[in-house]
Image: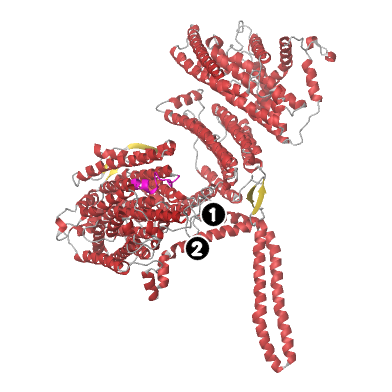
Amino acid sequence: MTFQHVLFIVFGAITLGGALMVVTRRNVFNAALFMILSFFGVAGLYVLLEAPFLAGVQLFIYIGGISILIIFAIMLTRDMMNPDLIGRNSQWIAAAVVMVPLCAILIWTVSSHDWAAAPGPVPENSILTLGQALVDQEGLALPFEVASVLLLVALIGAVTIARER
Amino acid sequence: MGPQIPLEWYLFLAAALFCIGAYGVLSRRNAIAILMGVELMLNAVNINLVAFWRFLEPGGAVGQAFALFVYAVAAAEVAVGLALIIATWRTRETVILEDVDLLKG
Amino acid sequence: MDFLSDLIVNIGLWLQDLLVSIGLPDAWVRIITLAGGAFILALVPLTAMFFLIWYERKIVARIADRLGPNNTGAYGGPYGLFQVLADAVKMFTKEDVIPAAADRWIFNIAPMVFLAIAVVVWAVIPLGKGIVGSDLSIGIFYILSFGSGAMVAILMAGWGSNNKYALLGALRGIATLISYEIPQVLSVTAVVMVAGSFSLVEIVESQNVIFLIGMPLTALLFLLSILAELGRRPLDLVEADSELVAGYFVEYSGMKFGMFYLGEFMNQLMVSILFSTLFLGGWRGPFVDQVPVLGTVWLVVKLLLVMLVIQFFQYSLPRLRIDQILALNWKFLTPLALVNICVIALVGKAVPYDPANPWVQTGALLLANVLMALAVVGILAVAGRQMRRSKLAGSS
Amino acid sequence: MHNSDLALNLAWFIPLFPFLAFVVIPLVTYRNRKLSHSLVIGAIAIAFLLAQIVFWRAATLPVGGGEHAYESTLIHWLATGEERLMLGIYIDPATAVMLFMVPLVCLMIFIYSVGYMNFGTPEVDPRYSRFFSYLSLFATGMLGMLVFNNLLTFFIFWEIMGTCSYLLIGFWYEKKYPDPNKITPRQAGLKAFIVTKIGDLFFMLGLALLYAEVGSLSYSEIFSHETLEHLAHTPFLGTQWTLATVIALLLFGGTVGKSAQFPLHVWLPDAMEGPTPVSALIHAATMVSAGVFLIVRAFPILQAADASVLAVGSIPFVAFIGALTAFGSSIIAVAQDDVKGVLAFSTISQLGYMVAALGIGAYVAGAFHLITHAFFKALLFLSSGSVIHGMEHGHHHVHEHEHEGHEEHHEEPWFNPNDMMNMGGLAKRMPRTFWAFLIGGLALSGFPIFTAGFWSKDEILAQAWTGNKVVFWALAISAGLTAFYTARQLCLTFAGAPRTEAARHAPESVPSMTTPLLILAVFAVILGWAGIPENLPGIGGIIPNWFHHFVISAIETGGHGEEHALRVAGHLSEASHAFEWAPLLLGMGFGLGGLFVGWLVYGLKPLQAGEMDRVEAGMHIIGLGWFHKAMRNRFYFDWLYDRVFVRTSIWLASFFDAFDYGQPVQKEIDGKVVVVRKHGIVDGLVNLVGRFGRGLSRISDWFDANIVDALVNLAGRAGRTISEVGGILDLRVVDRLVDLTGLGTRALSDLSNVVDLKLVDSAVDGIGDAIRTGGRFIRPIQTGKVQNYLLLASLMVIALVMAFFMILFLQI
């Protein structure tokens, strides 16, 4: 029971608990806040995984960007708050019934495989490696470009769709 | 000091998170809540990617890079999804998926 | 003297040894030392407040041609130094009102989140030579990402207090924050490119010549963006006193209001430290190598200067309309920041930094900046002339 | 064979241009109708030219030496884990002839659509540009399916076509009919989509199995000698069947779905709800032929499979399905009144022909009929479309005349322009259409010597004669029927006097519609001459049987095992050597006979308005009216499927729905009405039990009231004759007893209510939801809720993993 275990348990609890609240709260705004909480927990896990940069990105994009967007959308469509229209649909029990064995299967699959993982230390300049890999033509330059184009397209598309006519 | 937590823990956690998100996607009625479920699932995926990066090739960059790509995709998806939801809200006055059935056969 | 040379670290080590000798397991020792360090670190800004609020009030008073706090009655104290204490007491004793229709949970949590975020970012700021909470490899990025968490707190406050002014204030605030994050991040990126690291410590150490000289445009961009982020005039949308009463925390009273107030002020302090760290060389200054503690003094001096500048903006300029503010960002600052990044990247590649004579790169950068500034001014002049002409044509 | 031939490499670009057109239209030019359709037509024209170059190049390559299966140099396509899929083009004779046919027909049909969608007239379709972009996407799918070199791309483009089919059948999705039993376009679209998906599922499983076994899907590898040997001799999961058999059957499943073979044929007739060019393009000329083309493509595997599996008697399974389909649908077609319905069923039967031919190993004959049929069937559809178009215009015309001077818009009475009973005498009104239709009809019914249909059909029959007598007779008889209903259709539509006002005023269609008809008509005639058997005495030698030589070379030199080459040659050599008179004469006899009988029945004395269909009348006279009714109702297949699958699932769905949730409640929420269900878990249960109990008590009441009383009275009378007292006594006693049972059951049922609603709730709720979702998923008339599909998908995942687990560890 080292310090890391404590942190892992704490962050894991935050993540899963937040996620559970997200899918169960009736009030969508609260659900969004719990989603932010869950994202925060995930960021903590990244820190535990010694990927601080990703932790930062997690906070920056998910909490600073995506969650804010979602909350804005919630405020823009006030029907969200209509108590008769929010909450679960008719198949929620079936969904739960399906999801439990799915989770079981996933966990079984994971545990049935022997992860011969003897992780070495993370090199000091892992962020440098990441950055170079992203602009390296042999490496991930193409996916990187594609991702940026995708973002641009999404931006334009979103504006076009949501524009007042 | 390397990680003292076995890789399985992260994978279990990711699996649980994924299933919770999927449950949200399946069981919520309004589109934005479903979007949140999707976000949770994406996060689960990312946890897996980063965990694999950390435990299987900490020297490389592919795991982190793909996590970043997932971020990009998530951002795009949310932007377009919310735009669609808002457009739907304008035209159909609803955000409930069941009510949007123009092409219902 | 060598004990003084890095005070905090030695104290930390000493404490750690003490705990181990008591016989606690490592994990607990680690937890306790970290918690203690965090606690001390959090105390720094909270205590600094008392002086800095007084400082701001004095400046305001001088700008408004008043005396400012000079006598705190029963509390005594020279020059009204304890004014802040009095305010604190007043806040503590005020009644804590919660609107009936408020979303209680959110309403109550919001100020804590706000303050927590304001405190958390202090972990990575180098307060002096070797005095830093933790030298994260992503230091500055850490600050930015947590700063974006403040938005959530603002939204929570605006939504939770269930008041249309509050919600409007929150939405306008978020609009500003989100849009001004872009030039802020871009300007920081320029600094990071030149310094070659995210870590604030390394950024400070790489400033043999302070970056303000090298890239004044970047500094200007950063300053403007932090003005907006802080909600300071001329860019204050978050609380536009005359339109939105107090913006998102209109409904708050007592200590919760105090938390917001404190949080905002700590943000101000933080960004001024950030500015002095990024552009003014942080704790660097004469004789720091001999007397490391002097570094902190230098830092304080620099941040007081920066705060002075911010105060001057704040109290001498009128407020812009929201559309003007957003237009300023999207049509001017963001493009400029993008151009700025490209130029600095090119120059940085063309003229590599050599430690022998650091002024070479600085000079190149400065030249590039001046050219950019001239170009911008020229473009603005042309655009303005056309605008005036069209206006005239329209009027006549 | 990785040589690079410039002309053949042009095939890379064939699918490109239609795709570009598809992309550009919705993005840019959707406002400008003229630009849109010129874009599409231009694109397909370019594709047509390229395809011609490729075709002639491939045709003029020296025969043999594997030259005919040309595979370009491969490019990396997508990386799957450790290995990357390679993509190239693959031109063999089958591809080449398809490349000759497809773009040409597409071009014709696209041009035709311009007129059909009323371009330039006030009633031009509001979604005109969208229609053309869909068409273009479809062409992309078909061409891409042809040129590329592996089954995966084949499947992808195949699915693209499926999507287009859905989009285009449901193109007029807002259309509704007064008759609720008539299927609406969007229902038809969904039906087609789902029914074909059933077949595609098999196809995909086949692909998965093949890939898992061979590790590649490119033709050159899966058709190589070793692979086929391996497949032919490896048992499938320890069963008796060989892998080749299973794979072949699975792939054939895809064919059954796509080209509407029995039992999945039900979607094609309803697909006629789409615009007629669509029916012509997708559901006659190209897409349904894709199914057959799949067999042509996978022919080596089909040969490697052992034909005895699932064989019906001596008939191989594939041939059996084909023959059955051909026969049954040609019977059905006789009784159809919808002008497109007849053609739809004839399409099904012709496809059955091809499948049967391939099933008995007649590769060349099948491919040949595929090509010719595409031409004359497209011709037929387009001309029928022209007829319908004329009828509609005539109807509008008449209608305007009735309402002269009315400014306000009047509601037109619904009029079915497809019904042949409303036509007649159109030959004078629209002569060009008539001639086109006539030629197409003759080709379809295999009018001897000079129509294409004759030669291809004759070749199939010849093969069947040597291959399998049963199949031969089935095909021959259906050939007769085909001729008969073609004659019927021709006479009903064009002969005699107009039977309605609309028909009397129907105008000839615009040139942009009739010109393609004439071009197609030419091909419908001359194309047969490419495949005249050489050993046919008389004209046999005049034109060499080019098609045969060309296409057969693919089998002989396609680069797979001698064993199969021999087996195939075993079938094929007969066509080219020993000539048989019997099949030829029989075929001619049936064809001409059918035409003649049809002319006797319908043409000699044309039908009058309001007169009953002659065949129907005749069958009524000989007491076969019920059978004709069955024919008219397509042998009740739709009815059957509706009852068996659709209704049951809907019933289950709504049953459990009411069961768990009670009835939906209309609720008024800030101004708009929404349906909110109160989540009453138990009341459904209560109702059920209550209903049960009420039923019981009602039964006992009835029993009590009628039977027992009767008995009692009887006994009473009997008793009265003996003694007053005893009679009264037992009357009382028995009555009391019986009432008591009634009361008892009532009380029991009430009790059971109380017990059950405590016990079963949540479990029932879960099951209810699951089944309800299942029902929602199966019913083709569904709300298309993504979440339900997702749920089902995850269910399937679980099921698959479980199955995998069992197979892996329990060795089941």
Is residue D123 on the magenta stretch?
Answer: yes
Instruction: Look at the numbered disc 2 and give the secondary structure of its residue.
Output: helix
Which residue carries the number 1 mark?
D776
> Within 10 angstroms of label 2, few (less than 14), some, or many (20 or more) residues?
some
> Of label 1 and label 2, which has the lower sequence position?
2
| x and y percentages locating residue D291 in the rendered image | 35, 53
| x and y percentages locating residue D39 in the rendered image | 36, 39
Q: In this view, does C61 lie to the left or right of C281?
A: right
Which residue carries the number 2 mark?
D643
| x and y percentages locating residue C256 in the rendered image | 74, 27
The answer to whether one can see residue C18 in this image is no
Is residue D542 on the magenta stretch?
Answer: no
Instruction: Identify whether C256 is placed above or below C381.
Output: below
Chain letter belonging to callout 1: D
Instruction: Look at the numbered disc 1 and give the secondary structure of its residue.
Output: helix
Identify the disc placed on residue D607: none
* Most foreground residue, D629 or A120: D629
Q: In this view, does C60 lie to the left or right of D36?
A: right
Q: In which quarter of the image is residue C27?
A: top right
